[in-house]
Image (cartoon, coloured by chain):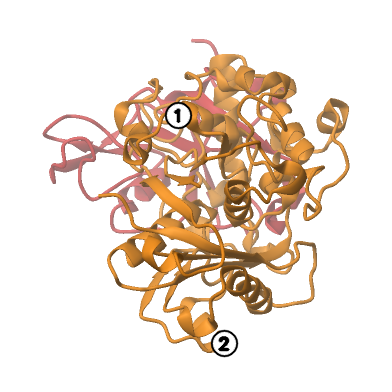
Chain colours: A red, B orange
Amino acid sequence: MQIDYGKPLPRISPDNAPFWEGCREGRLMLPTCEDCDAPHLPPGPVCPHCFSDRLVWREASGRGTISTFVVVHKAWFPAFAADLPYNVAQIELSEGPRLTATILDAERSDLFIGRPVTVVFLARDGIVLPYFRPATAD
Amino acid sequence: MKPNAVIVGIGASEFGRSLPQSQLALGATALKHALADAGLEREDVDGLSLHLGWPLGSDYDRYAEAYGLDIRYVNQTWLHGRFTGQSLQSAAFAVSAGLADVVACITAVSFTRERGFLGGPGDVEGNREEGGSHGEAPPYGLTAPAGGAALGMQRYMHLYGATPEKLAAVPMSMRAHALRNERAIMRKPMTLDDYMTSRMVVDPLRLFDCSLINDGAVVALVTTEERARDLRQKPVRIAGMQGIRAGREEFIFAPRGMGINQQSGRQGPARAVDLEIYRMAGLERSDMAAFYTYDAFSPLVLFALERFGFCGPGEAADFVQGGRIGPGGELPVNTSGGLLSEAHVAGWNSIAEMVRQLRGTAGASQIPDARALQWGTCWGDGVILTS
């Protein structure tokens, strides 16, 4: 699935490149500390909890809940004007760190804090981005 | 160490929308007025503390060149409103340490001309690694600082039951202050219905939750107590300060720990370290005759009140009801109308108002016998000014 050209793309850095490589493979990867076992976001060069250098990338469940969200009604950015209104949410992953992304297939009434969501991956302009969808009951 | 620093002059340009002058021209007007106010000459200014450099404003070297200044101390922060207090603090450090005799804090904005920088494609701010510093996520279309304030307010409403009707008390109170201020851009009364029917900008924030987009300049001149004795105005002392807070428990537009970005989700009451400004000033919070804050978005007022313990976590939406922060209230906030209704001069319009209040020259906005006033932001920095 392709989305409109002209929207900003993430900046890939040495610290976050494995996150974006994981998305390309359909896997949500978290930098995780081998010393204190804590995952973190956004990806950094050291563990922000214990300052260890021993980071490894582990696959997350892709499940989480909406911790906060907004619905954008103003066209600050022309490339998004056709999408108005659209939501942007922060998702608290079940592993703990929070990620910001849009919740797909969600009306305003589907958006509430605590709502379970699951990750989906969509290609756009040569990169794959994580999005979320309201979770269906198990 | 207490700073040996006083504000001895303030000046402003006109405030308005689509003013024809450049930022440098607006700043020159404000500087001339501030020098005349203080009884100082241009040649006395040997320090600059600038709050909004390129691309929103001009840089320190251009100011010095354009105004013919000869400068030996410079501070310039990057282009955010958050650095109001820090820029004033840097001026205080410089004169206290003898690095400058007179520091001009110059803030000049042409927001109406530079709109593309405010969340649009020209806003390179949001495109840094891992997004911008207000929670921006440009790949998903969250490109403006207002989005960050909305992220904070949505969760605050969820946690504490605050409602849009309660939040309305913030912009309505700012408007009530502005009605007493002839410089204010917004001079029409705001009703609850006006607020509730204003268009949604970024849910849960409406148009009237967002600061004005305007042009204007303010200059404040800072020197030492000793130097101030020879000058025209009764000096206003910088009596206490504390710095900006940062870390994983902090998000610029939310109370500490509330659960935005990587905050733990454990918001607690104000701690001793949050209140060190009062200890430096040798004053109590209850000594503050009014509170001044960076009201770029109305939730920021709530979060700042909680940050400094004027009320407990989750209590601010109730605290601001019943005219408490309006004219004649128990704790007036932004008595000239703030960024929401006077003008967005990056908080310096409120710093100038604090000086007028402490001189007793605030006209219809004057708080009787105002002796101590606080600047404090929801990102934790503060400055206490005393007469």
- Is label 1 on the same chain as label 2? yes
Which disc is residue B356 wearing? none
Dot 1 falls on a residue whose secondary structure is helix
Disc nearest the viewer among 1 and 2: 1
Give me the C-alpha separation between circle 1 and circle 2.
Answer: 42 Å
Q: Residue at x 56, y 71 (%)?
A: B55
Horizontal relation, residue B37 to residue B49: left or right? right
Q: Residue furthest front?
A: B230
Where residue A50 sits: x, y (%)?
16, 36
Q: Is residue B207 visible?
A: yes
- In the rendered view, would you say A118 is above or below B189? above
At label 1, counting other C-alpha atoms closer than 10 Å, the crowd grade (few under 14, some 14-19, many 20 or more) is: some
Q: Residue furthest top?
A: A138
Residue type, label 2: Ala
Locate residue B279: give its quadrant: top left
Residue type, label 1: Arg
Where residue B260 sits: x, y (%)?
46, 32
Pick the front one: A23 or B314: B314
Locate residue A78: give its quadrant: bottom right
Pick the front one: B128 or B342: B342
- In the rendered view, would you say B359 is above or below B248? below
Which disc is residue B285 wearing? 1
- In the rendered view, would you say B386 is above or below B37? above
Pick the front one: B120 or B76: B76
Residue at numbered disc 2: B66
Q: Residue at x 49, y 59 (%)?
A: B7
